[in-house]
Amino acid sequence: MSMWMSESELRNASEESMEITLAVRVRKSQRKVSRPVWFVYEDNSLYLLPIQGSDTNWYKNILHDSDVEIFVAGQQYNGKSKAITDSIKVKEIVNKFISKYGAKEYVALFVRLM
């Protein structure tokens, strides 16, 4: 069974992981679905980047219901999500992803999923 995580536990667990599992509520059916996602954790914020942009279903689901569950290192964290639409902030976050995962990996994933 998963345990609830504090902010510091989430930060520590995320430093050791390359991906997390994100669970969101589907807009139409209201059931929860999960999927692995890449992330960056910084300044008490967990950033998720929908590689397919606003067409990604989990992104659309988050816009409809901001409650999310994050699973990392066998533990669970519940929180609220907030879409970031400011182009300057989005570029900063993309650079954080490139820094963590590498430009080659990021570009390959971006091109493959488009």
Image: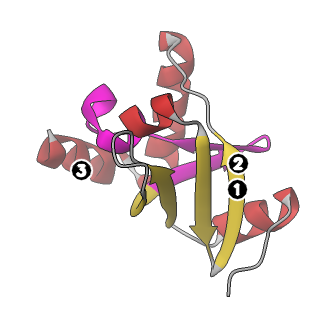
Residue at left 69%, top 81%?
2
Identified by mark 3, the residue type is Leu
Identified by mark 1, the residue type is Asn
Tell me the crowding category of disc 3: few under 14, some 14 to 19, or many 20 or more residues within 10 angstroms, Cα based.
few
Identified by mark 2, the residue type is Gly
Kind of element beneath mark 2 = strand
Q: In the image, is 46 to the left or to the right of 113?
A: right
**Where is residue 30 drawn, in percent x and y?**
43, 49
Residue at left 54%, top 39%?
96
Question: Considering only order in the chain, which callout, 3 or 2, is on the residue closer to the N terminus?
Answer: 2
Tell me the crowding category of disc 1: few under 14, some 14 to 19, or many 20 or more residues within 10 angstroms, Cα based.
some
Q: In the image, is 113 to the left or to the right of 83?
A: left
Q: Which residues are magenta?
A: 38-59
Q: Which residue is mark 2?
A: 79
Instruction: Identify the disc placed on residue 109.
Output: 3
> Is disc 2 in contact with disc 1, using a CB cutoff of under 8 Å?
yes
